[in-house]
Image (cartoon, rainbow, N blue to C red):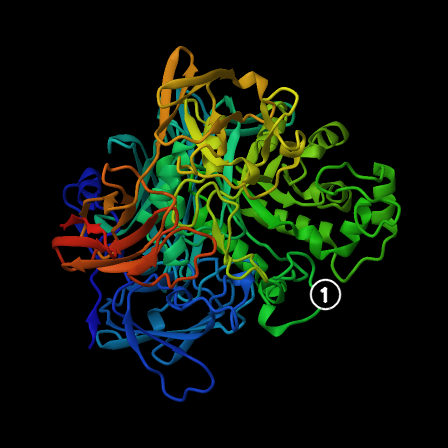
Amino acid sequence: MTKVVTRILTVILVTVIVASCSSKKETTSISSISDFNFNWEFSLTDSTKKNKVWRKVNLPHDWSVEHSFDSINGEGATGYLPGGIGFYRKKFSLNIQDNEVAYLLFDGVYNNADVILNGSKLGFHPYGYSPFFYDITSNLNNGTENIIEVKVDRSRFVDSRWYTGSGIYRNVKLITKNKLHIPVWGTFVTTPKVSENEAKVNLEIKVKNNYTEDSSFKLVTELYNHNNIKVGEQSDELSVQKNSQDVFTQEIVVTSPSLWGVDSPSLYKAITTVLKGDEVFDVNETTFGIRSIVFDVDKGFFLNGENMKIKGVCLHHDGGLVGSAVPKGVWRRRFEKLREGGCNAIRVSHNPASEEFLELCDEMGFLVQDEFFDEWDNPKDKRLNKWETKVDSVTQGYGQHFQKWAKKDLTNTMLAHRNHPSIIQWSIGNEIEWTYPNSSKATGFFGNMEWTGNYFWEKSPYTIEQVKEKVRTLPKGKYDIGKTAQKLARWTKELDTTRYVIANCILPTASYETGYADALDIIGFSYRRVLYDYGHENYPNLPLMGTENLGQWHEWKAIEERPHVSGTFLWTGIDYMGESNGQWPRKTLPSGLLNQAGFEKPSFHMYKTLWSKEPSVYIATQQLDKSINKINEKTGEIVAKNSEAWKTAMWIWHNVNNHWNYTEDEMVSVEVYSNCEEVELFLNDTSLGVKKLANFEDHIYKWAVPFNAGKLEAKGIANGKTVTTTLTTAKKPTTVKLTVDKKELNADGYDVSHVVAQLVDENGNLVKNENTKITFSSQGDIKILGVDNGAATNVQDLQSNTVKTDKGRCLLIVQSLKDAPGKVTITANATNLKSESISISIK
C-alpha cells in the first residue's frame, strides 16, 4: 500500500521568524524534513534463493543481531553473527512543486549500499559509517507512487575487527526545499574569539540556486540561546547565479555568552532564512556551541581557558542487545552512567559517529574525538589486529575502497559533523602503522634479533638517529604512510581549521620520523605511556596525549603526574561485540568500565574514584586463593601476590565479586576502591581496622577477612565527609525484582525503557551468586527489543524475551510503538520464584 510522507517543518519557530522579518511576508515552499524511517520492507537473501521473502521493518535496522550466535559459520572478529545480502524497499508518495527540490539523506548504511529510486540507480556507497545523500528530484514520480530500494551487500562478514551490524542502521530523512535554498550540510558555524564578555560567531552559509535565472535574495541569520531568547542578528542583500551555488559569510557578536562546557553544555541555534521580497524561500536551523579549545605542548588541554584533563573512553558503535541500530535512549542511559563515573570525553572508535550520538554529546557535555578510518592504503588482518599477510575474500574491508572513496567519506563526515561543539579533534586514523611494515621494523621492537624486551613497557631499543636511518633505508611499499597522513590532514584542514587533527599512533617512535606525526596538530599514543616523556623531550613542539589506554590505575597515574599529557581515552568505556577471534563462547571483548548490558564493572568503580570529585567506596571480594592477593607470612598482612603486577595490568580487570556469600570461616580477600583518605571496614558492626589510601601503592585497600555471614560494611572519610557501602549475605532467591529507568514513554516509535530484573531473597537482599532463567512478558502495545545479561560469554539469542541471569540480574529493553498510547505491564517469570510486574505509560 502506498504511504504518504508527512512533511514536518524543520524549524519550529518559522512563524516567529517570519513575523520578525515582516508582518506581510507570505511563506511558500518552506523547507521540510520528513522522518523516513517507518514502513519499510526487508528481505535477507543469498545466491540460492530465487524469490525474496519480504517482512515489514522500521529503521534503524540491524539484521545481524536478529540471528543466533554461530561458532561454526560465524567469526569471533565480528562477534559470531552473520552478514549476508539484504534488500530494503519503501513505497511512498511525494507531491513537490515545480519550484522545489528533494533530497534523501542516509546517516549510515553498513555497507556497500546500492540505492535505487523508481528503477534508476542513484548511486553506490561502500563505507558503512559516513553519511550520504542524493538529489532525487529528477527521479521522482511526482504525485504518484515511488519505490525506493536499497541493496546492502555485507557478504564479506569478517570485514572488520569488531561487530559492525548490517543494514540501514542509522536514520533516513527526506528533505524538500525551494530551488533557492541552503543545501544539506550547507552551514558552518565557528566561534573564533571567545571570552566571558563577548563571543564572535562566524557563519559560512552555502546558498544554492537551481533556477535557470540569477537570483537576488536577503540572507537573515538570527541567534537564539538555550532559553530561546534572540541574542544576535545579521541581514545581507546577496545574489547567486543561475544553476550554481556560492558561500557567504556572516559575523555576529554575542555579549555575555553562555559557554559550552563539560559541566554546563549551553547550546545556541542559528536560524537562517532566505527571502526574496516578502517571500520566505528557505529556513535552516543550525545548533552550535560557543567555546574555545587549546592543546598546549607543556600544560595540556584548556576548555574555555580552564586547564583540565580529558577523562575519556573509547566506544565502538554497537549498543549491546540492539546491535548497531541503537535507539537514542540506549546511548543516553550509557552516557549517564559514564558521566556518573567521572568521564567527560568519548573517542568514537574507529569510525564516524551517528548524528544522534553527537547530538547527545552536545547536550550532555562530552568532549568528542571523531575518528575517520581504521584502514588506509593497506588492509589489516581482521582476526589478529595487525597487517594482513594473506588475502581472504570475507575479510576484505574498507581498505579496498580507500583510494577512491577516502576523500568523499572524510568530506561528508566533516560537513555533517563540524557544527557539533562536542567535537574537539578529528582523528585521521587508528593504529595505522601496523599496515606499513617498515614502521614496525624502524622502531627496533619488531624484527630485531638483538632485542628481547616487552614492547608495552619498555622504551625503544633504537636511538632517534637509528630510527631515522631505518626509516630512510628500509624498503618502502607502494604507499608512504607520511604522505597519506599529510593528504588526509590537508583534506581535513580544507574544511575545518578550528579543531585539532590527531591520530592514534601505536608506534610513535617511528611515526615521529616517517612524516606521520608531521601531519598532526597533536599526537595520540596507543598503549605507550612509557614514551610520554620521550615524546615531550625529543619533539617539544607537538602536544601529546593518550588516545587508547588500559582501564588501570597505572595509566591514569602516569597522566596525572604529567601536565603536558592532556588526558586519555580508555579502551573501553563499554564492552563491545567482536575482537574475539577463536575465543568461543566469548563473543565480546570485556575491556569496558561497563558491560554489554550497561551494568557497572569493578573497573568502573576504580575509575570513579580517580575521575569523580564525589567521595565513593566500593567493595570487591574473592576467595583468597583465587584472588591476586595473599597473606604475608612474616607480617600477617594481606598483600598483592606480585607487588609489581599493578604497574603492568592489562585490559581485563582481575576476577572479583560484589557479594558477601562464601563458606563459613573461609579466608576472603576484601578490596575497597575509594578516593577517601582512609577507610574503616566492619563485619557485623565489628571494626576490622582503619587503613589509609597512602599506604597502598596500587590504590586498592585490602583486608583478609574470615567469612562470617552477615553485613560487610566499608566507611570512607574524605574532606570530613563519611560515605558508606554495604554487602549483605543473601539467602536463596525468592523473588524477581524489577526496576525501570523510564515509566513514561512517548508514542513515537523510538522511546525506550530499560527494565532490570534482579534476584532477591526473602529480606530483599540482592542475590548475586546464583542465576536462573527469566522469561519476560508484556501486556499492551510495546515492542520487546531484546534481552541480555551483560556477560561476555553470553551467547543466548539477544532478540528474545528469555535469558539466564548473570550475577543474578539481566536486562530487557522495550520500545514504544508509533501512535499507540496506553498502559503496558511488564512481568518477569522464573521457576519457583515470585514474579514482579511494572507498569509503563505511553503517551
Q: Residue furthest front?
A: 665
Q: Which residue lies furthest to the bottom in this view?
A: 50
Q: In this view, does 634 lie above or below 49?
A: above
Residue 570 location (% of width, % of height): 54, 39
Q: In this view, does 524 lie above or below 407?
A: above
Residue 37 location (% of width, % of height): 29, 63
For badge 1, the amino acid type reads: Thr
Q: As rendered, which of 780 and 587 lies closer to the eye? A: 587
Q: As rendered, which of 509 and 698 lies closer to the eye? A: 698
Label 1: few (<14), some (14–19) or many (≥20) C-alpha neighbours in 10 Å? few
Which residue appears at 58% of the width and 59% of the height? 406
Q: As rendered, which of 801 and 714 lies closer to the eye? A: 714
Question: Do we see residue 497 in this rendering?
Answer: no
Q: Residue 581 falls in which quadrant of the image?
A: bottom right
Question: Do we see residue 148 in this rendering?
Answer: yes
Which residue appears at 42% of the width and 25% of the height? 617
To which residue does mark 1 refer?
Answer: 389
Residue 404 location (% of width, % of height): 60, 65
| Quadrant holding the N terminus | bottom left
Q: What element carries label 1?
A: loop
Q: Is residue 590 above or below residue 258?
A: below
Q: Residue 549 falls in which quadrant of the image?
A: top right
